């Protein structure tokens, strides 16, 4: 069966960095769009960054643009999120996801929406202290 597993979360001081990893099995990894989502109490789960099969097709939420970098290694069935210059407002549970639907555009939030998700990981907590 399909399994999606995140790792790499933890506690870090503001300005620090973390690298999240996500491994997937039981699916054709290279034909799925992949993404990172995050959620805090009382808020809707939001797309942070998504990536298509081509490395040129990426989406970043405005709040993380210029600080986070998404990448994938299809040979290893692994998705990464390099998180730099972390801020307290980045504190959230981060979820890895596989998305089956093609986005209408890679420039808007539709490129990285929860309705397109077929499979979710269990989440990894990221806490940024001030």
Image (cartoon, grey):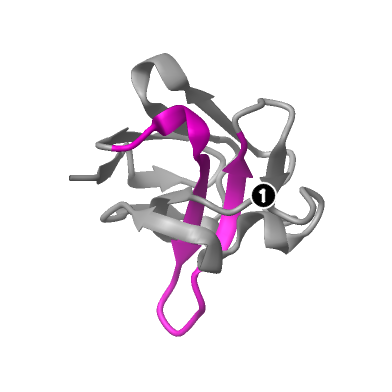
Q: Nearer the viewer, residue 91 or 43?
A: 43
Residue 6: quadrant of the picture: top left
Q: Can I make out residue 17 in this image? A: no
Counting from the top left corner in percent of width and height, residue 47 is at 58, 59
Looking at the image, residue 53 lies above or below residue 104? above
> Magenta segment: does it hold 51?
yes
Q: Measuring 18% from the left and 45% from the top, which residue is drawn there?
A: 1
Mark 1 nearby-residue class (10 Å; few <14, some 14–19, many ≥20): some
Residue at the disc numbered 1: 64
Looking at the image, residue 115 lies above or below residue 108? below
Q: Secondary structure at mark 1?
A: loop
Q: Measuring 60% from the left and 45% from the top, which residue is drawn there?
A: 50
Q: Nearer the viewer, residue 66 or 60?
A: 60
Q: Nearer the viewer, residue 51 or 69?
A: 51
Query: Farthest residue toward the left?
Result: 1
Q: Measuring 51% from the left and 42% from the top, which residue is drawn there?
A: 34
The residue segment tinted magenta is 27-52
Looking at the image, residue 12 lies above or below residue 119? above
Counting from the top left corner in percent of width and height, residue 18 is at 44, 35
Counting from the top left corner in percent of width and height, residue 60 is at 69, 48
Q: Nearer the viewer, residue 54 or 83?
A: 54
> Magenta segment: does it hold 36?
yes
* Left or right relative to 5: residue 31: right
Query: Farthest residue toward the bottom?
Result: 42
Counting from the top left corner in percent of width and height, residue 87 is at 57, 52
Q: Measuring 74% from the left and 28% from the top, which residue is drawn there?
A: 56
């Amino acid at each position: 069966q399909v399994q999606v597993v995140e790792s790499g979360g933890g506690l870090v001081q503001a300005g620090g960095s973390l690298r999240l990893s996500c491994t997937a099995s039981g699916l054709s990894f290279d034909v799925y769009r992949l993404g990172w989502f995050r959620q805090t109490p009382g808020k809707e789960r939001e797309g942070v960054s998504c990536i298509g099969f081509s490395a040129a097709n990426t989406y970043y939420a405005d709040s993380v643009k210029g600080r986070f970098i998404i990448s994938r290694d299809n040979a290893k069935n692994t998705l990464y999120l390099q998180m730099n210059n972390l801020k307290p407002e980045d504190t959230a549970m981060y979820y890895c996801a596989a998305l089956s639907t093609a986005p209408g555009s890679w420039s808007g939030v539709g490129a990285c929406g929860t309705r397109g998700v077929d499979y979710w990981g269990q989440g990894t907590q990221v806490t940024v202290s001030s």
